[in-house]
Amino acid sequence: METVIIIVFVIGYLAIALEHSIKINKTASAILTGVICWTLFAVASPSESILGSSQFATFLEGLKLDLADKFSTLGQHELYIRFVGSELSHHLAQISEILFFLMGAMTIVELVDAHHGFRFITDRIKTENAKSLLWIICWVTFFLSSVLDNLTTAIVMVSLIRKLIPNKDMRLFFAGMIVIAANAGGAWTPIGDVTTTMLWIGGQISTLSIMKVMFIPSVICMLTPLVYLSFTLKGEIGKASDSATKSKAADVGGGLLMLILGIGALMSVPIFKTLTHLPPYIGMLFGLGILWVVSELIHPELDEAVKKNYTAAGALSRIDVPSVLFFLGILLAVGSLESMLTLEHFAEYLAHTIGDNRIIITLIGLLSAIVDNVPLVAASMGMYSLDVYPMDHLIWEYLAYCAGTGGSILIIGSAAGVAVMGMEKIDFMWYTKKISLIAMMGYFGGAAAYLFIEHLLGKN
Amino acid sequence: MEATVIIIFVIGYLLIALEHPIKVNKSATAIVTGVLCWTIYALVSETPTEQILDHLAAHFGEISEILFFLLGAMTIVELVDGYEGFRIITDRIKTKNAKKLLWIICTITFFLSAILDNLTTAIVMVSLVRRLVPSRDMRLFFVGMIVIAANAGGAWSPIGDVTTTMLWIGGQISTVNIIKTLILPSIVCMVVPLLYLQFTLKGELGDANQSTEGAENNVHGSHAPVKGAKTMLFLGVGGLIAVPFFKTVTHLPPYVGMLLSLGIIWIVSELMNPHLSEREKKRYTAAGALGRIDVASVLFFLGILLAVAALQSMGLLHRFAAYLAETIGDNRVIITLIGILSAVVDNVPLVAASMGMYSLADFPTDNMIWEYLAYCAGTGGSILIIGSAAGVAVMGMEKIDFIWYLKKISLLAFLGYFAGAIVYLIIYPYLAVHP
């Protein structure tokens, strides 16, 4: 059954990649892939490797505690069904946290945009030169993403370039570079990216050490594609046509207020998390709720129908809900591979056949372009023990770099990429043709830099 | 701390009820209320943070299941509506008589809701009524009755309503028995308000032709109608009905089945009109339908369910139920009150709390209290518009005012609720397994 599910996953992936040739929306393919993988998993007869796994044993112990004497009445099939159900609800809870976070961030940014809030930033950027603009955007993205998460950074930056670059062909390159810069910027700080945070919380890396050794590789990971584009990028950023400006909703004021509130809400998400220990989506919803109330109250003079455009209710109808469902489908599909231990087995297989940790981790980074990097890092964390590889060991730092930046190679390899794809309607194939290669160059450039630095520092 | 959380919850609830006078969208209030309840709980409570996070994660997982189910169902219905699929049914209903139409609509709603969940049924029926009853004043009464009929129809079938399903899966009730004992009370619960309106409802359905044309122009602009209305109707309704079967076969949660149906219908909708250009096609695909559904009401649900979950995690609901048991004593009175309470708070946590309060050892399968709980929690929610999922969805679709519903429908729903309850209490000694 595992083979069948892998085949379904591969076919689903191809359907997503070939969206435009087969003329089926990628969200439909992603949802079906996720659902079919789980359906097959649920109706399959349980495999030995799952029944013998430590996950299954842990689940049984928990169930024993919950059910007490009723436990012994359950047959093996019943136990397996309950196991699949509990795995699925575990995944859904995690996935939903990302999805509602994404929805919250997209709505906040959309709301600021409806009030023309970004004008206050974009008006300050005077350059008409595409290349110098690209450098500015990339560096801002890089540093913003080291503080905020990659996803929020990418959403904010794409909203900015929408205003700055009317020429759509040119803007797509900027959007691609934003994905690369956001992922690169997230890799070198413990709070910049989910996987780096996982390693930090797990005690595999320490704050100062990761920032010290990872800064240069991350910069190189972004600079390599940037330098390449500096020589090859052709075209103008285009002129904002009057009709485009006019067709947009009228400026009703309150832009600066919404900008400050919006950016403030996004920036305070990590602070909220530190104070309350509640997951980030709660902080994001809090920010959204406050902005929503403010947006309802600052335009008392407008009538209901007009006002709706300037409230979060209106913003919610403009955000790209299909990309939220796309993410749901893709993450469910990857979750089934994780629960079937396919990913873990694959990582172990790599470890056994290859032997050199550096090559294995480089490959895990490349793999993270296809499947989500979170389960990959989780699997790696389980594969290598802290006793053998202590804190700040090469493999942990290198893993943080590879899993963090490898996702840029495909547009659906990272959360930032998926969000940008939804916002700018970037085609999977366009990204593969125009950006993937330079992202890969950056990935290997940074990887080489890291290994060289480690060599100089004399570790291992 | 508990007092603070309760106060915030109550204030939040008041602001939601007073949405229109204070002019703040109820979703915004609900989100802030839910988040504040958890924030205070996390900051002030002495419960270990780990445990609070575990509770939150468990609740959030369950809430997400409901939300994605909702999102899927709403999209499918919107998609069928985009193809004008419901016209195939509405074109068959020729009556111009408001009262006769009301009976037809309520009967269809009642039985549809026994198969589909209340929410989907209400959404489907309201889209139907939009076409059949152009006069808005009249339509609001129809919509109110749809809420009552959908909740009543859901109570007597194990797959008809979330709370009944919970009791069914938990082993508190069995399929045949719940249908046998609750169908009559459920019918009474719907027929009593219906009879009342039979005598008091005044007004016309309105001029159908004019406004239907108007609506058509809104949806389709100058485009010729696309083909595939019939296919989409069958696929859509079939997809919704298949969800409980999917659940029975795979044991996966209902939202998975809903997403499967959505995925299939989505692909069909993409392939249905190959001659159209990308732009024209978009409005007839699920992507277009997703742009038209009311995402704000999904966030409303998220906020309100999070808030109730906070109360539940803090043990407040549980203690309240125990307090009721101490002061009142008679289970029938308590459950009747729980039903009325379910008009204010979500019935899912109420039933969950009740399932924890009474053990299966004391009250075995098909005991009177479980059946009565299924009835009360299922139908009591009709008393307020925010009391049930169906009501909330309908409120979003038809922009029904909380106060309007309170004035015009609540009393009717209340009468139906009590009439059905009395019928159940009279007949259960003759039908129940454990009298």
Image: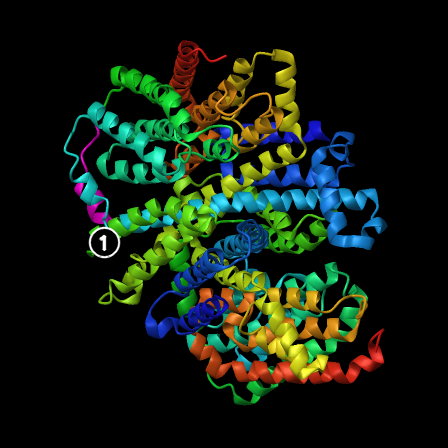
Label tally: 1
Whether the magenta-drawn stretch holds residue A249 is answered as: yes
Residue at horizontal 56 percent and vertical 49 percent from the top: B50
Q: Nearer the viewer, residue A199 or B56?
A: A199
Give the image quarter of residue A224.
top left
- Asked which secondary structure carries label 1, the reply is helix
Residue A298 found in image quarter: bottom left
Q: For the N terminus of chain A, which image quadrant?
A: top right
Q: Which residue is mark 1?
A: A257
* Residue A42 seen in render: yes
Give the vertical position of B170 relative to A6 (above or below).
Answer: below
Question: Residue B40: within the magenta?
Answer: no
Q: Relative to residue B343, is residue B220 depicted above or below?
A: above
Q: Chain of mark 1?
A: A
Question: 10 Å neighbourhood of mark 1: few (<14), some, or many (≥20)?
Answer: some
- List x then y, in percent, for residue A152: 37, 40
Image height check: is B74 above or below A126? below
- The x, y position of residue B346, in whole percent, is 56, 67
Kindly report the secondary structure that dominates the magenta region of the rendered protein: loop
The residue positioned 74% from the left and 71% from the top of the image is B370
Residue at 66 percent across and 24 percent down: it is A345
Name the colour scheme.
Answer: rainbow
Q: Nearer the viewer, residue B87 or B38?
A: B38
Q: Residue at x 25, y 15 (%)?
A: A231
Circle 1: residue type? Leu
Residue A265, image x, y percentages: 33, 49
Region rendered in magenta: A236-250
Q: Position of residue A458 (x, y in %)?
A: 44, 10
Is residue B104 something one can see in this rendering?
A: no
